[in-house]
């Protein structure tokens, strides 16, 4: 569940939101989409790279987008690649439905289901139309070796000046998310939020709050703590 107190932009139509990072990015994508769809908005979700094909809400054809919107549901747009994933839809198709939508939410990179990551040279793929970027990380990663929790390990270690066996601390996580070579890569002047997901218990919440403090005091980065139940997770 997400709220407008956490994400004020959810009160406004017209945003194109890109999600980057790891640690629950797809779950957040669908939670944001569902929140807006419940308001009666026409909501489009999808990817500019790859995403697992959902069991529900997938629009296999243009007519499916209309049907899902008419039913009060969000529509997931993408091209099946034959492996259970969707790739980005054809640019003209995506542009057409983005113009019709009240809100658009797009995954802009991948993380191999790991809780944190550093971007590769070609990542993230943020559309020019996108005006908001959310960089997601899972608090389950804090206190564990980078080599066990971080996708694009070599890139992350170089960015942080850390060894693979280094334990991820709130300080390192804040640096990773706030860096223009990390979570803020290609963000430019867009609105930017760091999302600290998996705040599932008091210990993780405390680690999240410490990370939030560092993000704001050192980097002036807004951040949000989130948690999702097992039934909500994508």
Image (tube, rainbow, N blue to C red):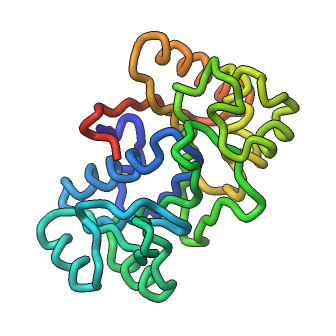
- Extreme residue toward the bottom, this view: 92
54 or 226: nearer the eye? 54
154 sits to left or right of 209? right
Q: Position of residue 127 (x, y in %)?
A: 58, 70
* Above or below: residue 170 compared with residue 22: above
Quadrant assignment, res 55: bottom left
12 sits to left or right of 166? left
Residue drawn at x 63%, y 65% is 125
Which quadrant would the N terminus be assigned to in this image?
top left
- Count every numbered label the image shows and give the total: 0
Q: Can residue 11 be seen?
A: no
Q: Can residue 173 be seen?
A: yes
Q: Position of residue 98 (x, y in %)?
A: 40, 76
* Above or below: residue 62 compared with residue 33: below
Q: Position of residue 6 (x, y in %)?
A: 40, 36
Residue drawn at x 40%, y 15% is 201
Quadrant assignment, res 173: top right
Residue drawn at x 79%, y 30% is 164
- Extreme residue toward the left, this view: 71
Residue drawn at x 25%, y 77% is 65
* Above or below: residue 223 compared with residue 83: above
217 sits to left or right of 49? right
* Above or below: residue 10 compared with residue 146: below
Q: Position of residue 21 (x, y in %)?
A: 59, 46
């Amino acid at each position: 569940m997400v709220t407008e107190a956490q994400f004020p932009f959810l009160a406004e139509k017209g945003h194109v939101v890109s999600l980057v990072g790891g640690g629950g990015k797809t779950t957040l994508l669908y939670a944001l989409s569902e929140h807006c769809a419940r308001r009666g908005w026409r909501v489009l979700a999808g990817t500019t790279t790859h995403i697992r094909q959902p069991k529900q809400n997938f629009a296999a054809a243009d007519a499916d987008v209309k049907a899902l919107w008419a039913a009060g549901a969000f529509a997931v747009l993408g091209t099946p690649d034959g492996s259970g994933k969707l790739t980005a839809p054809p640019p003209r198709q995506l542009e057409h439905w983005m113009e019709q939508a009240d809100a658009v939410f797009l995954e802009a990179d991948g993380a191999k289901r790991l809780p944190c990551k550093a971007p590769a040279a070609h990542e993230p793929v943020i559309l020019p139309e996108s005006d908001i970027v959310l960089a997601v990380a899972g608090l389950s990663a804090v206190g564990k070796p980078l080599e066990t929790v971080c996708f694009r390990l070599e890139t992350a270690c170089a960015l942080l000046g850390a060894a693979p066996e280094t334990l991820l601390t709130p300080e390192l996580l804040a640096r990773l998310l706030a860096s223009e070579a990390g979570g803020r890569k290609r963000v430019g002047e867009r609105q930017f939020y760091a999302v600290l997901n998996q705040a599932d218990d008091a210990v993780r919440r405390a680690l999240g709050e410490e990370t939030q403090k560092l993000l704001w005091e050192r980097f002036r980065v807004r951040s949000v703590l989130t948690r999702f139940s097992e039934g909500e997770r994508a």
